[in-house]
Amino acid sequence: MPSNDEVLKRWSAAAQFWEKRRELVRHMFAPVTHALVDAAHIAKGDSVLDVATGPGEPALSIAEVVGSGGTVKGVDAVAEMIQGARRAADRLGLGNAQFETASIERLPFAAGTFDCAVSRFGAMFFPSPVDGVREILRVLKPGGRFALAVWREAERNAFFWVLTRALAQYVTFPPPEPDAMDAFRFAAPGALRSIVSEAGALDAEERPLEFTIDVPLPAEDFWTLRLELSETLREKAEALSPGDLESARRLAVAAFQEYESDGRLRLPAEVLIVSGRKG
């Protein structure tokens, strides 16, 4: 099982590409951001924490929701991601969004700081999920709500399975060990909700969100995007011979083209939105 240091190293290597593609990623996952805002009851004037913000999303989108009377703090354990988030905030002129390098095990905020908290695709990588949720609860105000988004199984998400299946024709993907820190750690319904309840959250809820990932790119370009955003997939691809890599690329592009129309992809996707509140 990859250690936490190994996972962070992979995200560090991918940070430059997540910053490069930040606006595209924001667009692709906007439906998830909207669902998190709704589930956490985020409103104008709120103070919000975004855990595992990456290069600043959904924190920067939420900064527009809370307006000038609200604040958003984004944290991520990867310093390179935070540097990218700060550059994006400066470029967008969003002075109500600030970012700090910090791990979920020790958030650099006093108890009762925030009205709401979110994490989009971050909970799967918490070293200790129960302790991570408890830390989120610690920094929430009494009654404060939080919402976490995690992926359902790979076969429900073409964003993942198309490229993985193509590469798997030429390279081995060992099955993940139980509780491994990967994208599908909490894919099973109820898995993350039980952790949220164990951590002490009240009114723990879970709902599936089915949506379409709108990618304003043709299939040929999406192959490049997916390799950029995943250090693991990029390592697998780089290990192939030039001939096998080209064969895998053709397989993936042909599969992605089934979702392409008018020069853009529309990929079916499904996540779980798990929410709760502090007592």
Image (cartoon, rainbow, N blue to C red):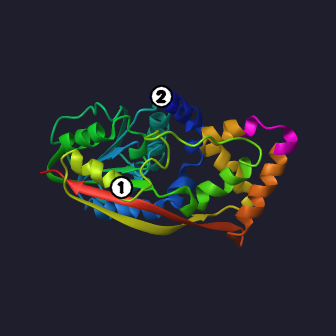
- Mark 1, Cα crowd under 10 Å, few <14 / some 14-19 / many 20+, is many
Horizontally, residue 211 falls left or right of residue 201, namely right
Q: Amino acid at mark 2?
A: Ser
Instruction: In the rendered view, tell whether residue 187 sits above or below residue 5.
Output: below
* Local secondary structure at mark 2: loop
Rendered image quadrant of residue 252: bottom right
Q: Residue furthest bottom?
A: 262
Relative image position of residue 263 (x, y in whole percent):
72, 68
Q: Nearer the viewer, residue 188 or 181?
A: 188
Query: Is any atom of residue 65 visible in this view?
Result: yes
Instruction: In the rendered view, tell whether residue 32 sits above or below residue 86.
Output: below
Query: Is any atom of residue 48 visible in this view?
Result: no
Q: Nearer the viewer, residue 148 or 49?
A: 148
Looking at the rendered image, the disc whose residue lies closer to the viewer, 2 or 1, is 2
Q: Nearer the viewer, residue 10 or 24?
A: 10
Give the residue number, with chain letter if any, for mark 2: 3
* Local secondary structure at mark 1: helix
Residue at image x 18%, y 47%? 200
Relative image position of residue 173 (x, y in whole percent):
65, 42
Q: Amino acid at mark 1?
A: Ile
Relative image position of residue 112 (x, y in whole percent):
15, 42
Horizontally, residue 53 falls left or right of residue 143, namely right
Kindly identify which numbered label has been placed on residue 62.
Answer: 1
Query: Is 99 contained in the magenta span?
Result: no
Q: Residue furthest right?
A: 243
Q: CA distance from mark 2 to mark 1?
A: 31 Å
Relative image position of residue 90 (x, y in whole percent):
44, 42
Query: Is 242 contained in the magenta span?
Result: yes
Helix, strand or loop for the magenta stretch, by majority = helix
Residue segment shown in magenta: 237-244
